[in-house]
Image (spheres, grey):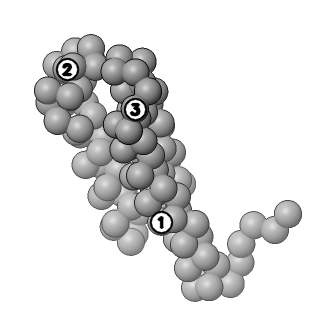
């Protein structure tokens, strides 16, 4: 989301820098292979909170419309990435979570 978009939702300007830093750190955690799995899980959770919160904020300020779904597109991509990362991990390491 753009600077104007974030400010338009009523968030303070310092929020932009924090959000940017968190997104950069989360992205690095997901793409650097040697980052521990627990950190990757937190990065996925952080992005999920971000996308869900963005949709809720847009809905609360602008009302229900197509823009509410825009962050959910990224949430869907994140979910696919998360699911396939676990499948690849199980194939590479031969273990997984069993219910």
Q: Which residue is more in the foreground, 25 or 51?
A: 51
Q: Residue at x 39, y 61 (%)?
A: 30
Give residue 58's position: percent from left, percent from top: 36, 26
Quarter holding residue 23? top left
Q: Which residue is mark 3?
A: 65
* Residue 39 in sight from this viewpoint: no
Q: Which residue is mark 1?
A: 81
Could you tell which of marks 2 and 3 lies nearer the N-terminus?
A: 2
> Which quadrant, please, contains the N terminus?
top left
The numbered dot on residue 7 is 2
SS for callout 2: helix
The alpha-carbon separation of the residues under discs 1 and 3 comes to: 26 Å
SS for callout 3: loop
Give residue 46's position: percent from left, percent from top: 45, 42
Q: Residue at x 36, y 57 (%)?
A: 29
Mark 2 or mark 3, whichever is nearer to me: 3
């Amino acid at each position: 989301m753009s600077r104007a978009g974030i400010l338009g939702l009523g968030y303070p300007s310092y929020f932009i820098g924090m959000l940017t830093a968190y997104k950069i750190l989360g992205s690095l955690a997901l793409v650097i292979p040697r980052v521990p799995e627990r950190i990757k899980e937190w990065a996925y959770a952080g992005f999920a909170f971000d996308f869900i919160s963005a949709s809720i904020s847009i809905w609360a300020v602008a009302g229900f419309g197509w823009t509410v779904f825009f962050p959910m597109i990224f949430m869907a991509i994140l979910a696919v990435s998360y699911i396939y990362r676990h499948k690849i991990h199980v194939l590479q390491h031969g273990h997984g979570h069993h219910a």
